[in-house]
Structures are given as C-alpha cells and as structure tokens.
Image (tube, rainbow, N blue to C red):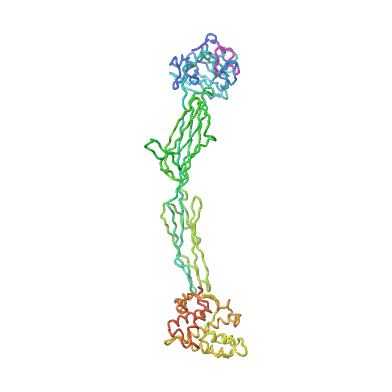
Amino acid sequence: MLLGLAALAAIQTIVPTGERAWAAGGGGFTTFDATLGGCLDSQNGVNCNHYTAKDRVYMSGGPSAGGLSNGCYYFAVLTPGSQNGGFVDGANGNLSDTTVGATAGDLGSGDAAGKRTFRVTNHLVTYPDTTCSPVSGGHAIGAQPGTGKLIIGVAPFDDTDNPGGVYTLAICRVGATSPSDCKFDAFKLDKANPPAVAELIVTKDANASYDRTFHWSIQKQVDKTVVKQVGGSATFNYSVSVTHDTGTDSNWQVIGTITVTNPNPTGNGSNNASGVDVVDNILSVFNPLTNTKTPDPNASCVVNSGSATGLTIAENAFISLPYVCTYSSAPVVSSETNDVSITWLSPNSATKSAEFTQGFSFDTPNLIDECATAGDSYTGPLGALCNTDASPTLYSYSRTIPVPAFDCLSFDNIATVTTADTQTSNSAKQTVKVCGPVRTAALTIGFWQNKNGQAIITGGASSGGVCKSGTWLRQYAPFQDLSSTATCSQVASYVFSVIKAANASGSSMNAMLKAQMLATALDVYFSDPALGGNKIGAPAPIGGVAIDLTQICTNISTCSTFINASGAFGGATSLTISQVLAYSAGQSNVGGAMWYANVKVIQEQAKDVFDAINNQVAFAP
C-alpha cells in the first residue's frame, strides 16, 4: 500500500547519465517472500502491511505498470512521522542506520545506506549492484508471490516507538535531500503474537581412519661358512628369505566438523544464542535394557573451538567446530556412532538441548610400510615386495672367491630389507671364510736330508762340544737313540740316516713316522730365536702355531682328499705344533721302534699330520 503518493507524483530523481527519472505515480512497497511467508493480512504480495517478524518484511520495486523508474535507489525503515528528513542516515527516526537515535528502540544496529542500495531497470530490481554503490549487498533477497520478481529484505532495523508497532518504509533515489525524492509505505509487526523462538540445530560429519603398519624381517643362510683348501677357488651358495607380518593396527581416530546453527531471525541481537556447550562422544555397544548405546571406554573426543563451553552464536548464523576423537586401543566394535549434544540458555530462559548422531565404520586402513625393497651388499637390489606377496619370499645366488695361498680371508655379505614409508631397515649378515694353509715356512724331510738342511744342523750351536740341537731332540722318546754327547756333525748324520730309512711299507709305519716327526722337530727348533735361531725364515716360531687336526691333507701333491686325524691325538681337534710333537712322542718307545702300539692306521694319521706341517699344507683351526 502506497502512502502520500499524491504529493510524490511529480518527483524527478537525479540518477547516473542515461537513466530515466521516476515516472509520475511510480513507487515501491513492502511485500513478503513467497517461501518464507510472514504476511498476516494479504497473501497476494502487493497489499500486505502486517507481518509476523522483521525478517519477513521485504521491499519491491513496484508493479510493471507504475513501478519505480530506471535508476539507483536505497531504502530505510523509519519511525512514523520521520518522513521529513529521517530517510538520511544519522537523522532522527532512521531505524536502518548505524546511529543511535533519540527515540526509544533506535539502537543503531542497522547498516549503511550503501548496503541498502539497489538498481531498477525496466521495473526489475538488481541487488546487490556495485554500479550504484560499491558496498551494495548484505540483505536477504527473495521472490515476490505471484510474480517471482526479486525482492529485498529490509531487516536489520531497530524497534519503532509507535505503540501500535507501525513502521514506515522509505524508498529514495540515491542522493535524496527531501521527502519528495522518496516513496513511503507503512507496515506493522505483530506485537501480540511474536514468532516462536526456534531451537538451535546441531549437525556433524564423522570420518574414521586407522593405520595398519607392516613389519618386515630378513634372514640369510649360506651352505657353508668356511672353506679350507690349497689353491683354486671356493663357491658359496646363499639364500635370502624376506618375511612380513599381517600388519599391526593403531592410531584409530574419528575427525570431522560439528555445525551449530541459530535459525532465529535477525533481531538486533535479541535472538543471539548464549551459553552454548558442546559435548562429543563415541558410542559403542547397544544396551537393550536402556535402549541406548554406551560410550566406548577407549575413545576420547576433543572439540577444537578454543572453548567448547559458553559459546555465543549470533542470530541467523552458524559456527563450525572441528573435532577429533582418538583411541587408546582398538575400538570395542568396528562400527560405532559419534554423538554430539549441545545445551544453551538464551534466547530461552530455560536450558535447552539438542543432539545429533552420525554413524561410521573403521573399514579401510591406511597402509603403512606395506611395501619394501630387498637388497644385498654383494648382488645389489634383490627385488621390491608388498604385503600381498608371499611370505617368505626367497632369493638365492652364488659367490665364488679365490682361495689365498696362505692363511684365511673373511668376507661379509649383508642382506637388507627397507620399508617404503618409514624407511625402517632390517638386515642379516653371513660371514664366510676362505683359508689356504697356515703360513709357517716349515721344511720337508727332503730339505733336512740335503746339503742345505745338513748345513743348518752342522752349523748349529754347541755347548762343551755337545750339539744343542741334539740335546733338544732327545727330549722326545723317538729320538733318544741319538747319542747324548753327539756333535752337530753327528746330529746331522743322525738326521740323514733317519730320513734315508723312512719307509711306509710293511705292517707298521714307524720309520716313516719317525722321519716326518724329526723334520717337524727341526722346523720348530730352527724357527725359534730362543732355540736354534730362525734359520729357515719363518714368520714366527713354528712351535706355537695351532693346526686343525680334523682336516689333514693325505695327498700332498694335490691336497684333494682329507682325513680327520684327531684320533691319533687323543681326540683333540686342534693343537699347536709343539703339542703335536709332545703327544706323538708320548705314544713311542725309546728310539721309535714301536709307535701307537704298532697300529698302522693310527700311525699313518700321525704321519700325515707331520707331513702336512712339513709341506705347509696344514690349516689353522
């Protein structure tokens, strides 16, 4: 309904270049949104002057015939009687501006005229429109009943001081300076039956996740760890086994956002919700006795709002609160629910509450270290594996290593498995040893019989005309047939004769065993600076060198066959060479006529030990 149109019929509005001024009799009026409703006296959207609430009052650009002419306009809600100047922001009686007025209820809780500015083109309203105002916008828009034309909500505005609850809507051209530049329409709000205050609405989502971490291990085997041989090379066959478990679950959590909405209309803050408390819980097993679900004792939820208590939610607004629920151990069941409950005070005097429950399931885990790579320090990469591959997965390869001429060399092979995500590594090592004979510089029976060996013996030290090497040899029973007063020349002749008599034929092997042991004894004596001096260039005194009695070469020329000779030495698996001499001597009578009770098999084992020592084909333990 238009008021005072006769006085306004001839208004000419000054608008941007190219715009037409209002036509005579043109005007706008209050109306309501076709969806929200709120009109109490007329439902045609044209003649409504009585509304249920502020946020139900809209303004229209008028009918197609007689509506507002093209141009830029703004609107303002006034107290009745303020039409003469009240349409300007800051003027007394303007309930739409941000200035506190002299009338009761005018709290200045509106907004600037620029935000209430719109454009009319061919009787159609455009809002917001920054060509008319750079800050245009912020008010609700709707559809006029019957026509569907765009209409603009006039709230927020302050309370009228009119006892009947009457307001005046002013629609003015931009730059208006007098009432003649405006159109006016009166309306009222229903004070007797104010709209009910709506309760807060709470909703949420719930996104469950957990981790499944796989552990990988590796083992490495080799077909042998030590090879002892003379010359050539040794081949080692390795196998690598990579295993993984089925995964360990951890880090269960539920995250999401809680949304609390205050659906109440704008009312200058009167519909703000205060004292809002938010509580979030994980609910688990259903209790049929109470018809409720009980909380999961393993879960704890935190609402990340700075404070989940005492919140304020403005009218016609909402807040979003992220939350996270973590588990100290596995959930009680895989499918649970997340429950949020809220309580609040105003806009009701009594405490109100609302609740929302969202179900979720721990379905698909986040896989961690589900894949790994295996490698080897010798072969390099072995392969890439994942948890779907067989466990164990086996790899094999061979490594051939040349055997050193003397002594042992060790070789480490390390296999490693490294996970893809955390880069965790596990390894397994196998060490193999390849051994040539122990280095002694020992010499054979042939050497001690020839001129070089004989010269060493002959040139040995004497004491009182008695050769010291002879005295030393006589400590062993087999050589006590040597004269106790023998000169070094006589000792040399004794050695020559014993070696010359060496023979392995017959029912016993005493002669050969005696010759081989004698050569070993001379090697010991003439390699030790403390005895006969190091006359043979030994790296160390031979007597202290330990040998392996379980692997004694029987064919010196090729060393392709071996025996275990520990039976000839009381079952010992290794002895020093001095210990070998002492033990074997203990098995002989004076002069070596009977040795090892003349059991040839045992004699031969002892002989092979001395022969291996003298030919430098004995191995270290």
Q: Is residue 398 visible?
A: yes
Image position of 549 with respect to 40: above or below:
below
Image position of 252 with respect to 351: above or below:
below
Q: Is residue 152 visible?
A: no
Let me know if residue 367 is in the magenta part. no
Looking at the rendering, which quadrant does residue 73 occupy?
top right
Image position of 169 with respect to 327: above or below:
above
Q: Which residues are magenta?
A: 73-90
Residue 376, percent from left and from top: 49, 60
Image position of 279 with respect to 505: above or below:
above
Q: Residue furthest top?
A: 6
Could you tell me what secondary structure mostly forms the magenta stretch?
A: loop
Residue 619, percent from left and from top: 50, 75
Looking at the rendering, which quadrant does residue 113 occupy?
top right
Judge from the rendering whether residue 524 lies leftward or rightward of residue 385; answer left or right.
right
Residue 214, percent from left and from top: 45, 51
Q: Residue furthest front?
A: 289
Residue 297, percent from left and from top: 45, 42
